[in-house]
Image (spheres, grey):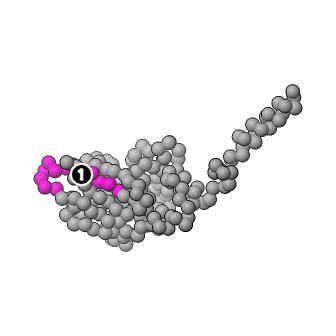
Amino acid sequence: MLINNKIYLSLIFIILFSGCNNPDSSGSMLTQAEKDSAALCIKPVPPADSAKFISQSIKVYGAVNKEIELTVDSLRKMKTVALDSFQVVCESGAEGSKSMMSRGVLLRDILKKAGLNITNHKDRNFAIIARATDNYKATFSWGEIFNNATGDHTIVLYEENGKPIRKFGEMKLICTNDIKTGPRQVVWLKAIEVTRVN
C-alpha cells in the first residue's frame, strides 16, 4: 500500500510539473513566435505565415472627406504622442506583453487629417473600424474618439520599446484606457474604415 501511495504521488508530481516550460498539446516546446503571439493575446501564427500579414501602410477610407494612406514616415511627420509604458491584458484577464517607451499618433488626429464627412451638427453617428490583414477588427464610436477620454488613449503605434515595430506589422493600434487592452489591440493594422450608422 505504501509503495502504491509513493507511485501515485510520483505520478501527480510528474503531471503537475511537466508543463512548467509551456509545452503545447503535443508535448513539444512552444516556438518563440508562438510565445510572442500568446503574449500579445493573439492566436499563434507560424513564422512562415506571419510575413504575409505584415502591412507597411494603413488606408483611411469610408465616410471621410478624403481617403489617405499613411506609412510610418507620414506618421512621424504628424503630431506624435509618447507612452512611458502600457500593459496588454487579455480578455481572460491574463497579462500579455508590456511595452515601454512607445510612440505613435492619436487615432483622433488621423481621422481629423482625413476629415469626417459630417453633413450637419447632428451628424455624429459614425463607427470607426480598425482592420488588420488577418481580418481582425476593433470598433470605436465617434463619441469615444471625439467626446471621451478614450480619444486621448487610442493610438496608432509605430515604435515600441524604443524600436520600430516589425514582427506584427509596422503599425498597430492600441487603446490604453480599456480595462482589458487586448481585445482592441490591432496588430498587422492595414486600414481604418469610417462608417456612417443609419
Residue type at numbered disc 1: Phe
Residue 19 higher or lower than 58, as above or below: above
| Residue 133 in view (yes/no) | yes
Task: Tell me residue 116's x, y (percent).
Answer: 21, 58
- Res. 108 image quadrant: bottom left
Name the element at disc 1. Answer: strand
Count neighbours of disc 1 (C-alpha within 10 A) and say few if under 14, some if 14 to 19, many if 20 or more: some
Horizontal side of residue 138 vs 52, given as left or right? left
Q: In this view of the protein, which residue sits in the foreground, 66 or 4?
A: 4
Q: In this view of the protein, which residue sits in the foreground, 46 or 102?
A: 46
Query: Residue at point 41% right, 62% down?
Result: 133
Query: Residue at point 71% right, 40% down?
Result: 16
Residue linked to disc 1: 126
Q: What is the chief secondary structure element of the magenta stretch?
A: loop
Quadrant where the N terminus lies? top right
- In the image, the segment drawn in magenta is 118-130
Query: Residue at point 22% right, 49% down?
Result: 197
Task: Tell me residue 31's x, y (percent).
Answer: 62, 59
Q: Check the image and name the residue furthest to the bottom.
A: 73
Query: Residue at point 19% right, 63% down?
Result: 65
Horizontal side of residue 16 vs 145, given as left or right? right
- Report if residue 179 lies within the magenta region: no
How many marks overall?
A: 1
Q: Check the image and name the residue furthest to the front.
A: 26
Q: Check the image and name the residue furthest to the top.
A: 1
Q: Check the image and name the residue furthest to the left.
A: 120
Task: Tell me residue 62's x, y (percent).
Answer: 24, 60
- Report if residue 128 lies within the magenta region: yes
| Residue 76 in view (yes/no) | no
Task: Tell me residue 70's x, y (percent).
Answer: 33, 68
